[in-house]
Amino acid sequence: MEANRAYSPIPSAVTSKKPVLVVVGTTGVGKSNLAMEIAARVGIKGEVINADSMQVYKGMDVITNKVTPEERSRVPHHLLDFVDPMSEYSVLQFERDALAVIDEIHSRGKVPILVGGTHYYIQSILWDSNLVSSKKEEQQQQQPEDEKCNDDDTLAHASIDPDLALAISNALKQSDATFKLKDEQTQAETMKEIVRLLSHVDPVMALRWHPNDWRKNRRSLQVFYTTGERHSDILDKQKEDGGGSLRFRTGVFWLWAENKMLDARLDGRVHDMIKNGLFSEITEMRRKVVAGQVAGTDMQTDSSNPIDYTRGVMQTIGFKEFDAYLTKLDQHAPSPAATTHELEKLKAQAVESMQAATRRYARKQVSWIKNKLGPKCLMEARKADMSGDIAFWALDASDLTAWGKNVGDEGVKLANEFIAGTHATKPSDFTLQLLQVEDAELLASAGTPSLKPDWTSRVCEVCLDKGGKPKLVHGAREWAIHVKSNSHTKMVKRQKRRQEFKQWDEKKKVSGEGDSGKIV
């Protein structure tokens, strides 16, 4: 009965879907603060669901910036601090667990509030069919841990040629979740084989992913292996259907902050972490790494880099940045003055690196919201003829002294109106301005055919990659971003100066100026 009272204000046109609120934004912008305010002050009590891929792991409360135990006692939190660091938690697991939690919260007449900056977590919940998973994987999720099998053991689809299936199977087995080979040459050959096979079975996806991104290349190859369909074809079908159906009545809050003000807060947050025990936390994690108690590490290997910072909890910003400092600390006692000075220098560099990495990550989060999530939400609203199934609001969190007015009070008001079904369906001018969307474009008639993404690879002859080769850029959008980047602009100017100097030098030689310095 309580559940009926909770949702009764929603207009009949939208009662078929229960509400979910979502709070997104960059790291350190205040997402958790707004979520807890809404949960405590919204007309019906809300409960928070963590959507940060690093905060799911146990421990490391400081480096992952988790809400405090006292804050958790005031507002129920789910999917937070529950995965052992020895395990790796996938987006498929999150989708399964989060949907179960949302159903349970709804059953009690409450409102789930999804909070986090991990975009593929958010997407997996809001839209159905965004993730491609085989029946084998889905069955494995239901099995006890000791009965689960590796995805290497998944049978090939019957439509695939046996010889090709065998080659793909071998490549998948050699690059499973523990892909950290001692022989770097073998690892490179395996990566090359994955790309070769993917280029053969699905050239569109092979062009889409960078050759060095073995996880995405492997995933696309695995999709073909288990379904018999090209990953690109599956994604095209999803796009034709609108990218998957919206699961819930969804209200999305984007906490935005001006770059300079946000950068200062992010840099300060690293110093706050240090005061709150960051070094102790990283040192303890280092001890677990050495003891083999963390996924993605192999301290027994002969490799120069036994820690895989692309896996599990080791992806957390801070661990990689402090690697050089901790390695030096392990090798030398800090008693000699020279060593102490060197350690302090490495520590300062690590702090700066952590700050820089945090700022870069924040930029990526903003890019995803501006270019993917926001436009997709507006397209959903347009597709539904602004009926109220989805709303997207941007709130200005730049000035913390104005938090109550600009974020807290405004967010609570909008949340209450959304739950009641009385909110304005048209996004604010501020929201449209941040998304760089014209009002006429938003309200244009639905059904305009979308162009298929261009994932053609392009080579930039001006810029070089880490290996000193011309930089390879995948996709039209990525190319447009690259040619406007500061690094590319600098390289173009540098190349222009070199060409001008070369022309001047050749002219000088032709004119017979010699060493006199006179210009004829």
Image (tube, helix red, strand yellow):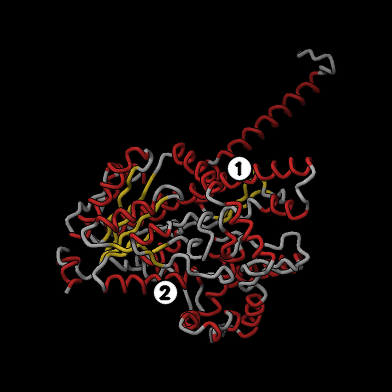
Q: Secondary structure at mark 1?
A: helix
- In front of the other: 22 or 376: 22
Residue 284 visible in image: yes
Left or right: 309, with 417 as reference point: right
Give the image location of residue 22, x and y in percent. Answer: 34, 58
Q: Amino acid at mark 2?
A: Arg
Q: Secondary structure at mark 2?
A: helix
Q: Which residue is mark 1?
A: 352
Q: Which mark is residue 86?
A: none
Give the image location of residue 49, x and y in percent. Answer: 38, 64
Q: In the image, is residue 113 above or below residue 324?
A: below
Q: Amino acid at mark 1?
A: Glu
- In front of the other: 17 or 348: 348
Q: Earlier in the sequence, mark 2 or mark 1?
A: 2
Residue 462 visible in image: no
Left or right: 228, with 175 as reference point: left
Q: Which residue is mark 2?
A: 96
Q: In the image, is residue 260 above or below residue 173?
A: above
Give the CA separation, mark 2 to mark 1. 38 Å
Task: Please identify, in this view, whether the residue under mark 2 or under mark 1 is nearer the observer.
Answer: 1
The number of discs equals 2
